Amino acid sequence: MAGCSNDPRNTGPRESPEPTGWSDTSDLSKGIFYALAADPTNPNVIYAASSTVSVYKTTDGGATWSAANRGLPGQPVRSLIVDPINPLKIYAALAGGELFKTEDGGASWQIIGSGLVQNTAYAAVFNPYAPPSNMDVSAGNASNSLSWNAVPNATAYKLYFRACPGCTTPPSFDTATWTLLDRPDPVALSYVHTGLTNGIPYYYAVIAVVNGEETTPSAMVSAVPENVTGQNPPPAQPR
């Protein structure tokens, strides 16, 4: 046993392990590093979350680093996430329980964590396939007009509806029981739903298709078409 390298009685010199492909980076102060986040469009741009200067940035693949913490408090950053659609937008979760965002690649940061309980935040997550937002509907004569915000990189929007004459509360959304509207332009951000029955509530939700994947449904909206004196219903559209 005395000849074994891990024998505590072996007090002779030990050989240093051979390099295995890893090397120390430069210009980084000592401290604890909690997270790394890379620019998906540029492999040389990387952000490092630390317990000292909060956030560092490299633009040469890690050869040199510089502080990218203007606007951040002097607290450890626990998590970083780069927006895969807009890599200049980055989110940081701080040990103090606050969330910060930069929209200029770390040149300046602004707090966005208003309303969060001030406990330690360990992670921030970005959902690239968020559903369409600001769903809006207005009623007309035998029609409802709808609109919503665009989802980045969406190739289509699926608009569903359900007529619910006896509903006193919003019905549960289900693609199996709701009707998918056959819209002539699947990427349009608005639609006039015609041929409706006045006085009946109609409920709507829209789903975006991004990279072949469907987002979760948007917030549900509803409207009751009604006949206003002198108002003619719009021409029927495909359903």
Image: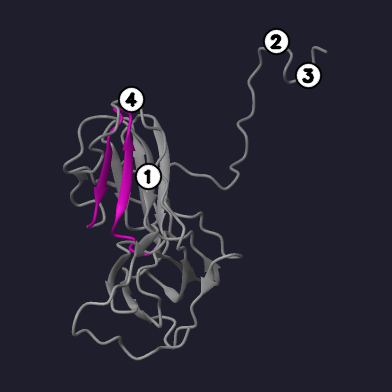
Task: Provide the residue designation for mark 3.
Answer: 4
CB under 8 Å between callouts 2 and 4? no
What amino acid is at disc 3?
Cys
Q: Earlier in the sequence, mark 1 or mark 2?
A: 2
How far apart marks 1 and 2 lie (CA) works out to: 42 Å
What amino acid is at disc 4?
Asn
Q: Earlier in the sequence, mark 1 or mark 4?
A: 1
Crowd rating for badge 4 (residues with CA inside 10 Å; few <14, some 14–19, many 20+): few
Q: Residues in magenta?
A: 85-103
Task: Provide the residue designation for mark 1.
Answer: 80
Q: Secondary structure at mark 2?
A: loop
Rendered residue at 33%/25% (across/down): 119
| Quadrant containing the N terminus in the rendered view | top right
Task: Provide the residue designation for mark 4.
Answer: 119
The image position of residue 193, as x and y in percent, is: 38, 79
From the viewer's side, name the closer residue of 232 and 184: 232
The image position of residue 79, as x and y in percent, is: 39, 39
Rendered residue at 48%/78% (across/down): 181
Query: Which of the two discs, 1 and 4, sits closer to the camera?
Result: 4
Task: Provide the residue designation for mark 2.
Answer: 8
Quadrant of the image occupied by residue 116? top left
